Amino acid sequence: MVKSLFAYLLLITLLLVSAESLGAAEKRVIAFCGAASKPAMEEAADVFKKQTGIQIDLQFGGSGTMLSQMKLARRGDLYIPGSPDYMIKAEKEGLIDSKTIKIIAYLIPAIGVQPGNPKNIKTLADLAKPGVKVGIGNPEAVCVGLYAIEILTQQKLLENVQKNIVTHAPSCAATESLIVMKKVDAVLGWDVFSKWNPGKIETVFLKSNEIPRIAYIPAAISTYSQDKENAQRFIDFLVSQEGQKIFSKWGYIIKEDEARKFAPKAKIGGEYRIPASYKPM
């Protein structure tokens, strides 16, 4: 009788432990992310799951599109756009908890060209040369497209370069793919693009005075979050030494002083709005 009772209690204990383990494995955190963080974020989410059992469901797209989807669905635990512009917008609309905002990595605007730079693009002004096909992100929904318009406007090159812009990509990843798929000669994007597909894209850096702002990838907990505790755990992982090593491995700049070397007088973060005079192609 005692042995049977002991066996019964042991079975119940094992079932409870299994149920708890299953429950932990089923915990999920939904993150709406700008595609500027895609390769590093995917690796970080995989490592985090192996360590904690928590699944990070990553949704990628243009930062503006992701914000709209999160707002429309009224769900999601984290918002991680590709620049502070959309985080500022999310904060103004009350869609994130501003006290939880953390900077994950920095991004430097740069020109991406085909391997070997066959069009001999060496400066921002070269994007206006006859016969050069240029791609940018959609400035109304994609961070890198917004920065492209800001840079070209500041340098008084928008009108001339716009004649060569043949497509507006729906995300950062899609902007980078324009070069990889050989659909354009150049994109105005991020310096990190060349690290995503080594050998398939080269970087032409802008002059320091051509960069008005240095971007960064921020993360914050959504006001719709149903699991703020684990959402915070993932943010903490992203800014931890281990998480930062993952971003560094993918070519992202993780320290502000390193980012400032590319444009010492540039602003860090901030917000830019497309001028009313801008006319999409």
Image: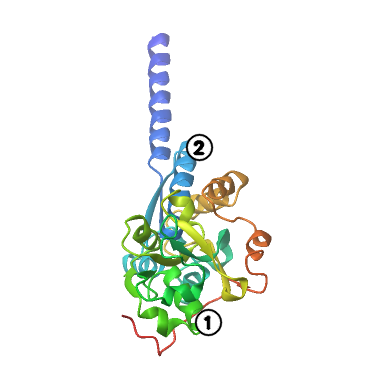
Q: CA distance from mark 2 to mark 1?
A: 47 Å
| Element type where label 1 sits in the image | loop
Q: Position of residue 263 (x, y in %)?
A: 63, 69
| Furthest residue in direction bottom, as rendered | 277
Query: Does residue 130 appear to the left or right of 100 in the view shown?
Result: left
Q: Position of residue 118 (x, y in %)?
A: 41, 61
Give the label, 2 or 1, closer to the camera.
1
**Vertically, is 42 above or below 145?**
above
User: Mark 2 sits on what residue?
Assistant: 51
Q: Position of residue 163 (x, y in %)?
A: 35, 80
Q: Nearer the viewer, residue 204 or 39?
A: 204
User: Mark 1 sits on what residue?
Assistant: 155
In which quarter of the view is residue 201 placed?
Answer: bottom left
- Kind of residue sitting beneath label 1: Gln
Q: Nearer the viewer, residue 230 or 134?
A: 134
| Disc on res. 181 | none
Q: Are marks 2 and 1 in contact (CB under 8 Å)?
A: no
**Vertically, is 43 above or below 142?**
above
Q: Is residue 253 visible?
A: yes
Query: Does residue 86 appear to the left or right of 248 in the view shown?
Result: left
Instruction: Give the quarter of the figure containing the C terminus.
Output: bottom left
Mark 2 or mark 1: which comes first in sequence? 2
Tell me if mark 1 has few (under 14), some (14-19) or many (20+) residues whose alpha carbon lies within 10 angstroms of its own: some
- Kind of residue sitting beneath label 2: Gln
Q: Position of residue 273 (x, y in %)?
A: 47, 81
Query: Does residue 128 appear to the left or right of 263 in the view shown?
Result: left
